[in-house]
Each structure stands twice: as C-alpha cells, then as structure tokens.
Amino acid sequence: MSRAAASDPEDRPSWTFLSNHGHVLVCLSEDPDLRGWEIAERVGITERSTQKIIADLIDEGYLTRERVGRRNSYTVNDKLRLRHPVESSHRVGVLLKAVMAPPPEIRS
C-alpha cells in the first residue's frame, strides 16, 4: 500500500497498534522537515489534528521545533520514556528503532 493510499479511509485498518501521536512521531523521526499536510496525509488524520498532536508532543518534550526559513524542522527526543505504564520502562528511541528498522526477511 502506498503512503497516499493509507490516507484513504477505505484502505485503513479499523485499529492499529500505535496511536496517532505515535504515528506522527514516527513520521517526523523519518523526515523532520515534513509539512503538516504531508503528515496528515500519511497518518490519515486532518491537518488540524496533526497540529494538535505536534503541539502535545512539543509541550511534553518529545519534539522540539526549529524554524528554518518559512518552514519548521523537528527533532525527536528519543531519550524520554513512553507514557503508558505498560511501556514506561522503554524509551521512545527503542520504539522508533523497532518500527523504522528494515523488516527482517520472512522465511517460509
């Protein structure tokens, strides 16, 4: 499935293992210079929801924003712990490394 197709409600699963906050964090970790509409398209949410999530992540220290010309560039703080008590023994960097690593070859 292409990234663009993922934003089509018909093509999205009814639930996922990561929250939209997690999806936004993964997107910005992969490409810190993405625009809000690009993130919204990839995650399958509105641009306004994306802005709110980015603000949440900045407020809690998971992201920092730097103005570069007329655009924003984001840095993920991968040292912070995940927020839910079930995962709080792990840092954000562990999650990002796991979901961004090339998938291992599947052997039949």
Image: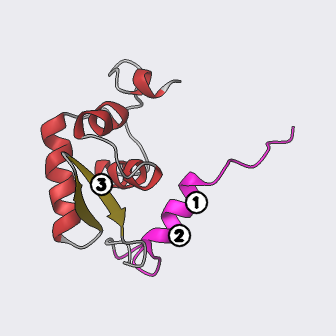
Density class for disc 3 (Cα within 10 Å; few <14, some 14-19, many ≥20) is some
Figure quadrant of residue 5: top left
Q: Are marks 3 and 1 in contact (CB under 8 Å)?
A: no
Q: Is residue 33 above or below residue 79?
A: above
- First-in-chain label (2 vs 3): 3
The residue located at (45%, 76%) in the rendering is 91
The spot of residue 66 in percent (x, y) is: 24, 61
Q: Main secondary structure of the magenta part?
A: loop
The residue located at (56%, 53%) in the rendering is 100
Density class for disc 2 (Cα within 10 Å; few <14, some 14-19, many ≥20) is some
- Label 1, on which residue? 98
- Label 2, on which residue? 94
Q: Which residues are drawn in magenta? A: 85-108
Distance in Å between CA atoms under marks 2 and 1: 6 Å
- Label 3, on which residue? 73
The residue located at (17%, 61%) in the rendering is 56
The spot of residue 71 in percent (x, y) is: 22, 46
Q: Amino acid at mark 3?
A: Ser
Q: Amino acid at mark 2?
A: Val
Figure quadrant of residue 92: bottom left
Q: Nearer the viewer, residue 71 or 78?
A: 71
Q: How many numbered marks, from 0 up?
A: 3
Distance in Å between CA atoms under marks 2 and 3: 22 Å
Q: Is residue 26 above or below residue 34?
A: below
Q: Are marks 2 and 1 in contact (CB under 8 Å)?
A: yes
Element carrying mark 1: helix
Q: Is residue 43 left or right of residue 47?
A: right
Figure quadrant of the C terminus? top right
The residue located at (42%, 72%) in the rendering is 78
